[in-house]
Image (cartoon, rainbow, N blue to C red):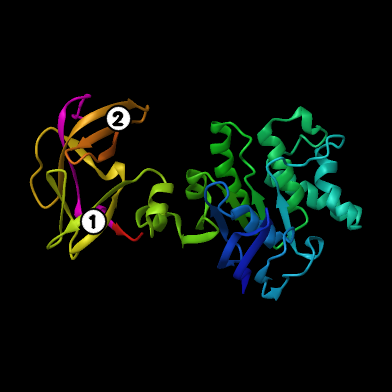
Amino acid sequence: MHAIQLDDVVKEYQSHGEVVQAVKGVTLEIAEGEFFSLLGPSGCGKTTTMRMIAGFEEPSRGVVKLLGKDVTNVPPNKRDVNMVFQSYALFPHMNVWDNVAFGLKQRGVAQAEIRQRVTEMLEIVDLTGREKRRPREMSGGQQQRVALARALVNRPRALLLDEPLGALDLKLRQAMQIELKRIQREVGITFVYVTHDQNEALTMSDRIAVMNDGLVEQLAGPREIYERPATQFVAGFIGTSNLLAGTAAAGVLPIGGGRVLVPGQDGDVSVTVRPEKITIDTAEPNGQVSAVPGTVAEVVYLGTYNSYAVALADGAEVTVFQQNAHDSTTTAERGDSVWLSWQPQHSYVIGS
């Protein structure tokens, strides 16, 4: 049985006398115990989709199911899901223990069970010993753990998280990504996670629905979405990608005085290749590889790797990532003539 199902869900609003569709017929299934992310830019409909799962928004059309049961018109407090917001919404006058225990007390759970469940949950989120602290006495990461513990202690069948790491600094956010995945595996609850951060989704998710303009453009695992983007939007939104287009003949796409190998392709094609798949060198490569000449337009040092912007003869620009390994022999500088090369399997033909 699926934890969550959306069947052709549409959400419409009235804006200045016109009907605007925020969500345009989304259909998806989320398995029990899955870490599932809704990923996309601002305004793509991901938060509206989550709010319809939670019951805070009612679909204009379509069906929302939880564990096989139609809950389209069921109010939020009657759905077996909890939600964690970016603001955390902790009670400032309560300490950690009381914040986490609040929902259980409201439901009239026995004191002995409250003690047991709160103790277990604080241990899972690594807050044992901080029970007496108030939210203002804690870091952003610790407050986020309190919000998680408060939601999870009720043992919902699914936890919905709306960009909960957005207020944290980069290093803490990266650490909390790993921590969130650990907690999710430990408690075994379905997580539905909304984010606009591609790296965040790739790091934590079992599957990702990439949304754009109210539609799901691709639904797959992180590796599939990164390595084999279904559309130009997905290729451009997930990480950094180079898009090369032209007319192929006999499996060869002429680009900027060079060649891109696209076995089995003829006619107009669009090809994406990731920057880290490309080798940059001063000599023309040999063998059955894609090879394109260009001129280094910019070099940016980024610590673990260099980012090269290489201008091709036809005006296109290709980004290349080269790791700063101790034995790296390429020292291309701005203005240098170089050759870019990559294996045929790293050219992926995509749709519109």
Pinpoint residue 224: horizontal percent, then vertical percent: 39, 58
Q: In this view, does 116 lie to the left or right of 86?
A: right
Residue type at the position of mark 1: Gln
Total marks shown come to 2
Q: Is residue 42 left or right of residue 129?
A: left
Nearer the observer: mark 2 or 1; the answer is 1
Q: In which quarter of the image is the N terminus?
A: bottom right
Magenta range is 327-348
Q: What element carries label 1?
A: helix
Q: Which residue is drawn at 22% across and 39% down?
A: 315
Q: Which residue is drawn at 22% across and 30% down?
A: 296
Residue type at the position of mark 2: Asn
Q: Which residue is drawn at 52% across and 56% down?
A: 213
Pinpoint residue 107: horizontal percent, then vertical percent: 88, 58
Q: Which residue is drawn at 60% across and 51% down?
A: 194
Q: In this view, does 138 lie to the left or right of 107?
A: left
For the residue carrying disc 2, how many other residues have a C-alpha within 10 Å: few (<14), some (14-19), or many (20+)?
some
Q: What element carries label 2?
A: loop
Residue 324, numbered label: 2
